Amino acid sequence: MNVLDQTEVVNSKTKIKPVVAVTMATSRQGIGVVKELSKTDKYQIRAITRNTKSAKALDLVKLNNVSLVTGDLMCPKSLNKAFDGAEIIFGNTTPTKGWKIFRGSIVRNYEIEQGFNLINQVKIAYKKGTLNHFIFSSISKPKDPLKSDPAPGHFTSKWDIEEYIKKLGLKEITTILRPVSYFENFENKLPGYTISKSIIPGIVEKNVKWQTIAVEDIGKWVKGVLSKSYKYKNQSLNIAGEELTGQQMAKILQRIVSSERYKTNYVMIPRIAIKLLEYDIGVMADWIERAGYGANMNELKRIQNDLDITPTSFEDWLKSKLIADRNQNRSWANKWKSSQWELQLDNNR
């Protein structure tokens, strides 16, 4: 296993492949980015994570051209060392800081602090003369700017970080990717509102068009943008994979499971329940219905062709999820059978 200690300095000039530093590498976005870049065999990927011994980190280091580096967005010193010698940096932040009653898990100032730490260290890396491309993962701007307020705090925090990028004079080397809601958000654990063959749960009204994307596709976008770096610096892109209503989503799942005689319905989680559990998500649901994500789906098709990106469709994501769930159920069933056999052996002794 190749693990770089926090104190080790890596000089990319001694390497043939350019070094890409990926922050929050064991997050859903980070994993997608590392995996996609690893497939190209064009980069030396520095996967930055707080815990290089976690199961997710150990899975990443098995990939080609991936090294683990200890780094924390709340610790500027660790970022400084992790970014040293990197020619490309992928930056990602999170507002999630553990759930508390009356607050939820989303803390805007927590994400702002991460973002400012990140951008300050990107600026330092740029001044050293090695860094030439920074990709920041933000969140989609609205389709209707006149209806955008009030926006959820975990949106405005990322947009404020975007402004800080401009303030520090990094815009010319920066590509901002602004994804919409993730398909993976349908996998909530709320009782009665968990995705299944008979239910597509959602946070907006059934006839509202809702732009969504597979989280792993952010990795595809990063790979694509880096393939034409000269063209996509100083650009900001709202990115999405689908634009569907809840009813349309339910019909897609219904078609997939029709042979099993399931009836699939779209079920909206009550807004009051969302706001009680995670207020900012409730504000987000209001915002989607009022303003809506602003990805231009027709323009995105042109850009996807330019960057050789094949977006994951909602149908394909659902199929892969059903296969994964089936395999997991088989695994649990096998474990149960094994435990019963062991119990029988114990009883026969």
Image (spheres, helix red, strand yellow):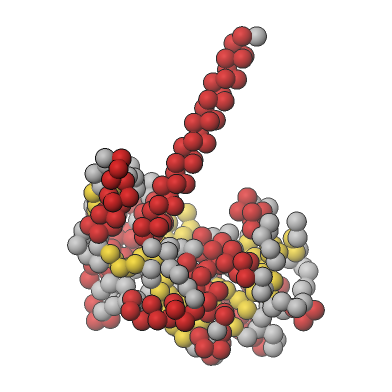
Can you give x and y, in whole percent of width and height, for residue 181 in the image?
37, 65
Q: Residue at x 25, y 67 (%)?
A: 209
In the rendered structure, the answer to whether residue 142 lies left or right of residue 15 reads left
Q: How many marks?
A: 0
Can you give x and y, in whole percent of width and height, for residue 190 in the image?
34, 46
Where, by quadrant of the figure, is residue 245 drawn? Answer: bottom left
Where, by quadrant of the figure, is residue 275 drawn? Answer: bottom left
179 or 37: nearer the viewer: 37
Q: Residue at x 27, y 42 (%)?
A: 262
Q: Residue at x 57, y 67 (%)?
A: 36
Q: Is residue 227 above or below residue 272?
A: below
In the rendered view of the protein, which quadrant contains the C terminus?
top right
The residue at the far top in this view is 348
The answer to whether residue 67 of the structure is visible from this angle is: yes
Q: Is residue 286 above or below residue 266?
A: below
Can you give x and y, in whole percent of width and height, for residue 185 in the image?
39, 57
